[in-house]
């Protein structure tokens, strides 16, 4: 194995760790299936924000294929994970990220809004490149 592959794997592991820590701060319980789907979605969006613009045609099918499940189950599990984090999560983090939280009486963000905001925040924090078309 060459050095560049080792570095790429270390960077990928660091990115996954960063996303995981962020999701836990957002209050997404790790025991939910949606947690794993959501992390995959955020990592995909962090790499290519185009997927957020077409969650039903690009994002959900790719995650469903990877986890050997259906697109409908992916969407529902992600929605459930976001709902749980919205109710139980860190209100300050939501305020910072979205400008509102459950405490302000606003409805929760949509799946694509949630994924896009977190992916963008992670991309800015890590300084990683994002493919933009």
Image: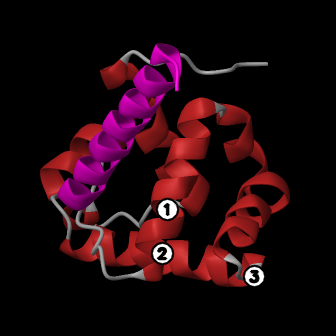
Neighbours of disc 1 within 10 Å: few (<14), some (14-19), many (20+): many
Is residue 24 located in the magenta-colored stretch of the structure? yes
- Viewer can see residue 99: no
Neighbours of disc 2 within 10 Å: few (<14), some (14-19), many (20+): many
- Spatial CA distance of label 1 from label 3 is 15 Å
Residue at image point 71% right, 82% down: 69
Residue 24: which quarter of the image?
bottom left
Q: In this view, does 123 lie to the left or right of 112?
A: left
Q: Which quadrant, please, contains the C terminus?
A: top right
Residue where numbered disc 1 is placed: 38
Q: Which of 51 and 2 is in front in this view?
A: 2
Residue where numbered disc 3 is placed: 70
Prevailing SS of the magenta stretch: helix
Q: Which of 72 and 11 is in front in this view?
A: 11
Residue where numbered disc 2 is placed: 34
Residues at marks 2 and 3 touching, judged by CB atoms closer than 8 Å: no
Is residue 17 located in the magenta-colored stretch of the structure? yes
Judged from the image, the secondary structure of the residue bearing numbered disc 2 is: helix
- Viewer can see residue 69: yes
Q: Percent x, y for residue 46? A: 53, 35
Q: Percent x, y for residue 105? A: 29, 67
Please tell me whether residue 29 is drawn above or below residue 91 in the rendered image: below
Highlighted range, magenta: 1-26
């Amino acid at each position: 194995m060459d050095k560049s592959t080792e570095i790429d794997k270390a960077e990928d592991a660091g990115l996954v760790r960063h996303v995981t820590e962020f999701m836990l701060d957002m209050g997404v319980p790790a025991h939910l299936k949606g947690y794993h789907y959501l992390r995959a979605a955020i990592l995909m969006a962090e790499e290519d924000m185009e997927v957020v613009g077409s969650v039903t045609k690009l994002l959900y099918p790719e995650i469903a294929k990877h986890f050997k499940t259906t697109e409908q189950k992916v969407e529902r599990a992600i929605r459930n994970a976001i709902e749980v984090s919205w109710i139980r999560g860190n209100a300050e983090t939501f305020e910072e990220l979205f400008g509102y939280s459950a405490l302000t009486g606003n409805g929760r963000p949509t799946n694509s809004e949630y994924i896009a905001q977190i992916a963008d925040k992670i991309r800015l924090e890590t300084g990683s490149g994002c493919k933009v078309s």
